[in-house]
Image (cartoon, grey):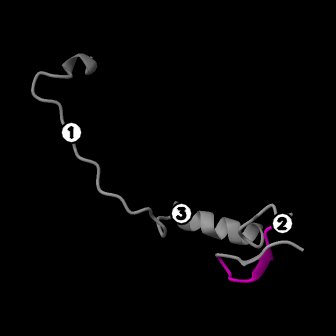
Amino acid sequence: MGKELKCPSCKKPTSWQDNPFRPFCGERCKLVDLGKWADGSYAVAAEPAPSVLPEEGQGEEYLN
C-alpha cells in the first residue's frame, strides 16, 4: 500500500501514496484546514515589522 499517516485535521488513518489531498484524508479536511488559516486560527509566529516613517521632507516626491 504505501506510507500510512493520520490526517492532521480529523486524525483518521490515510494513505500518502495516490492521495491528491495529502496529507489530508480528503477534500473536506483540506478545506477545513485552509479555512483555519484564512480566519486567523492558525498563524506563524513572527516579530512585528518595524514601522518606518520617512523623515520630514523625504519621500514627498511620491505623494504627487
Residue at which label 3 appears: 37
Q: Nearer the viewer, mark 2 or mark 1?
A: 2
In the rendered image of this protein, does residue 40 appear above or below residue 13?
above
Instruction: Please provide percent x and percent y for residue 23.
Output: 71, 68
Q: Residue at x 48, y 67 (%)?
A: 42
Left or right of residue 45: residue 16: right
Residue at which label 2 appears: 17
Instruction: Please provide percent x and percent y for residue 32.
Output: 64, 70
| Residue situated in front as seen by the camera: 35 or 23 | 23
Tag 2 or tag 3, which sits nearer the N-term?
Answer: 2
For the residue marked with disc 2, what is the amino acid? Gln
How much space separates mark 2 and mark 1, taking CA atoms? Answer: 48 Å
Residue 52 position by quadrant: top left
**Extent of the magenta region:** 9-16
In the rendered image of this protein, does residue 1 appear above or below residue 63?
below
Residue at the farthest front position: 2
Residue at which label 1 appears: 52
Left or right of residue 24: residue 34: left
In the rendered image of this protein, does residue 50 appear above or below residue 5?
above
Tell me if residue 3 is in the magenta stretch: no
Residue 14 position by quadrant: bottom right
How much space separates mark 3 and mark 2, taking CA atoms? Answer: 25 Å
Left or right of residue 25: residue 43: left
Instruction: Please provide percent x and percent y for residue 30.
Output: 69, 66
Badge 2 vs badge 1, beta-carbon distance below 8 Å = no
Instruction: Please provide percent x and percent y for residue 29.
Output: 70, 72
In the rendered image of this protein, does residue 39 appear above or below residue 8?
above
Q: Residue at x 22, y 44 (%)?
A: 51
Element on which disc 3 rests:
helix
Q: Residue at x 76, y 66 (%)?
A: 27
For the residue marked with disc 1, what is the amino acid? Val
